[in-house]
Each structure stands twice: as C-alpha cells, then as structure tokens.
Amino acid sequence: MSKNIFKNKILMVAGGTGSFGETITKISLNLGIKEVRIFSRDEKKQEDMRRAIIDKRLNFIIGDVRDKSRVKSAVSGVDFLFQAAALKQVPSCEFYPMEAVKTNILGTSNILEAASESNVKKIVVLSTDKAVYPINAMGISKAMMEKVAIAKARELKNKSINTKIFITRYGNVMCSRGSLIPFIINKIKKNEDLTITDPEMTRFMMSLEDSTNLVLKAFNDGITGDIFVQKSPSASVKNIVLAIKKIFDSKSEIIYLGPRHGEKKHETLCSAEELGLAKNLGKYYRIPADLRNINYDLHIRKNNKYLSSIRPYDSKSTKRLNLKQVTDLISKQPYVVQQLKLH
C-alpha cells in the first residue's frame, strides 16, 4: 500500500484493544499517521495496550459502540475508521442473543451513522465467515451487520456523500484472543486434558498478518459496499490440536466434548449466490454490493451467472492442510514462537 495513505491522517479503531487493533495500530504508526484513536469499553485492556505501545500519537477513548452520542464525540475529525468492536464468542451470543444485537448490529449502525455525519472518508467493517448461511446468534448478528453496512453504503452513494464503506470477512484468525490455539496452549502449560469439540470440524486458517492485509486491501482497492474475502486453506480441529501437541511435545490427553451451542461442522466464506457475482482477484474475492434502488423494473441486469452450477466457498471444499502442513503453519506464528520460549 502507499506509504502516504495514512500520513498526517487520523484513524479510529473501534474495539481497538483486540489482536487486530494492536496490529493495525503498529502498522499505521509506522506509516506516518497523525493520531490513532483506540475506542473501546475495557479500561484494563487499554492500560495494557498503552504500556505495550508507547507513542504520543495514541489516544485512548473509553466508550461503547452502543452509545451513539459517545461514538459521535469520539469520531469527530477522524479520516478513517476500522470497526472491529464485536461480541465474537458463539456460545455467549447463543445465551445472550440480544447483547449480540446491541453490539454487532446496533453498535455498528451507530458507528456508520456517526462516521458519515462526521465526514469520515473510509470505513472498514470487520465481519466473519459465520455470517454466511448463519445458524447461530453471532453469525446472524454479523450477517445483519453486513446488511446494515451495505444499506448505508447504498444510501450514502445515492445522496452523493463521499464516505465509503467496505466489509471484510474472516475465517479463524490463528492465535487471536479467545481462539482455539491460545486455549490449547494454555491447557498444555497447565498439564490439563485438551477438551475440544468435534475432531472432523474444519476451520479456515488465517494469520493475524493475513487479517490486517485483508483490511488494507479493502481499504485501498474497494468500491463502496464491497465485501472482501481472502482465499484461505482449512484444517480439521483434530489436526490443529495434534499439531500444537507436537510443537509443544505435550502428553496431554485429548477429550472430545461434541459441538458447543450453535457451532457448525464447516464454515463458509462466500455463498454460492455471492460467488456468482464475485470478482476473482487472485488471492482475494471482491463481492460487489447491489447498489441499485428498489425500483427493479428500471434496471437491466446483464451477465448473470446461473447459480445452480456454483458451489459455495467453504472450509470443507477448500484446500485442506494435512497434519505436517498445519504443524508447519502454526509453528511459524509469532504468538506460538513466543509461547515456546516461555514453555
């Protein structure tokens, strides 16, 4: 990306104390950013990040995306915004679905409304593979979040307002906070049994670097309303756990508990319907938004693909990594390298 894109600009990262927020903050600080605003509700995580990244250009703001007035105050003067604030744990969203609605849907709506009113130039909203063919509350809330973002992009385009909105959709980000790999490593360090769900479950494998590159790809090359997806290999849960055991030379026993509330056996990054419209960019898919208005008779649709011949892009049918490949991939992740030194 251009080194000048962030120079002398103000970036706000909502939910900025997570793994993505910390990584994108470090990148933007190296690209001459004027200010990075970290907007989140957890003061302990903010304090930890403040001590980890010492830079006078960092501005920590306590607030909740559910509170539009607080968001509006925080976003004033911002050039670019990354919306990473979310409830992400599938079981907790199953038990408290309205909390997922308040944060993932209404909170994102507050971000988009406040940002467009403040003339923010570009917004990237972070989504998940669980938003495709969703069966759980987290995925449903993220799917609705995507629809809210696309609807807002359509509205702003029709009003000739220059705020651009893009969406990125992730698979599992390896070693992100609360994910499987840190969970298993923690169990190994405590010499506990390794409790996992279904050994035949498959999940897309993305690194933290992949996740930030995907956001920057959308930020640089997106057309408002676009969804960007990175093509990624997958691995079975069983091989992920066996790989971690091998890396840490662990004798811990594996115990299968069965799926948790709302869990899928396989995840999907692009639906068949989306792939019929998607642009193949090599490493990525760009799914353009349908920005037509609701008067369908005024539009002529050209070059539609027949959807019946298209398969969704899912973790069952994508390239599947074997145990050696999973082991090699996981062992290279910076978090794992660090944990090995401490082990």
Image (spheres, helix red, strand yellow):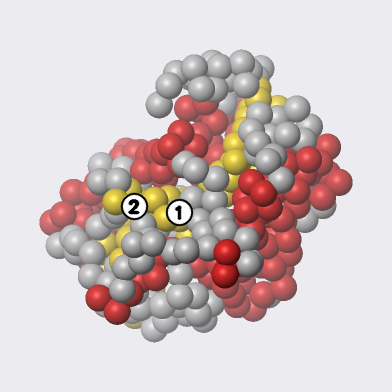
Q: Verify CB contact (< 8 Å) between mark 2 and mark 1.
A: yes
87 in relation to 43, above or below: below
- Identify which residue is drawn at 34% across, 52% down: 279
Q: Which sits in the foreground, 230 or 288? A: 288
| Circle nearer the N terminus (2, 1) | 2
What residue is shown with label 1?
288
Residue 186, x across and y down, in percent: 42, 56
- Identify which residue is drawn at 16% across, 54% down: 325
Q: Which sits in the foreground, 270 or 224? A: 224
- Identify which residue is drawn at 55% across, 45% down: 224
Q: Residues within 10 Å of mark 1 (few under 14, many from 20)?
A: some
Residue 87, x across and y down, in percent: 62, 61
Q: CA distance from mark 2 to mark 1?
A: 8 Å
Report the number of numbered marks.
2
- Residue 279 tag number: 2
- Identify which residue is drawn at 50% across, 56% down: 289
* SS at circle 1: loop
Amino acid at pointer 2: Lys
- Residue 30 tag number: none
Q: Which sits in the foreground, 296 or 119? A: 296
Amino acid at pointer 1: Pro
Residue 96, x across and y down, in percent: 68, 75
Q: Residues within 10 Å of mark 2 (few under 14, many from 20)?
A: some
Q: Quadrant of the C terminus?
A: top left
Q: Quadrant of the N terminus?
A: top left
307 in relation to 169, above or below: below
- Answer yes or no: is residue 257 visible: no
27 in relation to 180, above or below: above
